[in-house]
Amino acid sequence: MRRPATTLLAAASMLAAGIVASAAGDKTAAECSNSEILARIQSKFRHQVTHVPHLPDVDIVEFRKIHQHRYIPFGETQPIARRYCGATAHMSDGRRRAVWYLIEDHMGFAGVGDGVEFCVSGFDRWFVYNGHCRVVR
């Protein structure tokens, strides 16, 4: 008698997981161009150029050509949904640089909000993201 109930419960949880995954997939395209995420990248970049020696004193003025190039949805083997995004950053010195960023769902401070890691081409002085921002691509 318990076996059908267990099977029904497992089927319901798989259906719910599918609904959650499809709902997460619907918001992925817009998430890369989320103004809050982009503002956080600008702010963190400002902190980086201020505190890392020998980096030019520039700011990111604007983002263009924002795109998502990979999405790994939440799943049984992948507990964190990840979006890999890219854009062209227009800098305050007039140059354009590639910027790559990773958005991880619910990985902000203490699990509140989304976590963001980014790399601006030519500004990863200590190779934190490997050569040419490979880790966040």
Image (spheres, helix red, strand yellow):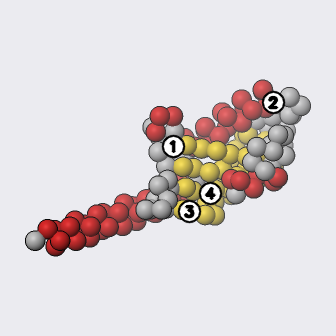
Q: Give the quarter of the image for residue 17.
A: bottom left
Q: Along the horizontal axis of the image, is 107 left or right of 137?
A: left
Question: Residue 65's spot in the image, x, y percent?
Answer: 68, 58
| Residue at 75% from the left image edge and 48% from the top image edge | 129
Residue at image coords 56%, 62%:
71
Determine whether, in the image, residue 78 is placed left or right of residue 58.
Answer: left
Residue 117 position, x and y percent, is: 64, 44
Cα distance, mark 2 to mark 1? 25 Å
Crowding at label 3, few (<14), some or many (≥20) Cα neighbours within 10 Å? some
Query: Label 1's element?
Result: loop
Q: Position of residue 31 (x, y in %)?
A: 53, 53
Q: CA distance from mark 1 to mark 3?
A: 16 Å
Q: Which residue is mark 3?
A: 71
Earlier sequence position, callout 2 versus callout 1: 2
Disc 3, SS: strand
Cβ atoms at labels 4 and 3 below 8 Å apart: yes
Q: Give whichever of discs 2 and 4 has the lower sequence position.
A: 2
Amino acid tagged 1: Met
Q: Which mark is residue 107?
A: 1
Mark 4 = which residue? 84
Mark 1 closeness class: few <14, some 14–19, many ≥20 residues within 10 Å: some
User: In this image, 46 relative to 57: left or right?
Assistant: left
Q: Does the image show residue 2?
A: yes
Q: Which residue is labeled 2 in the image?
A: 52
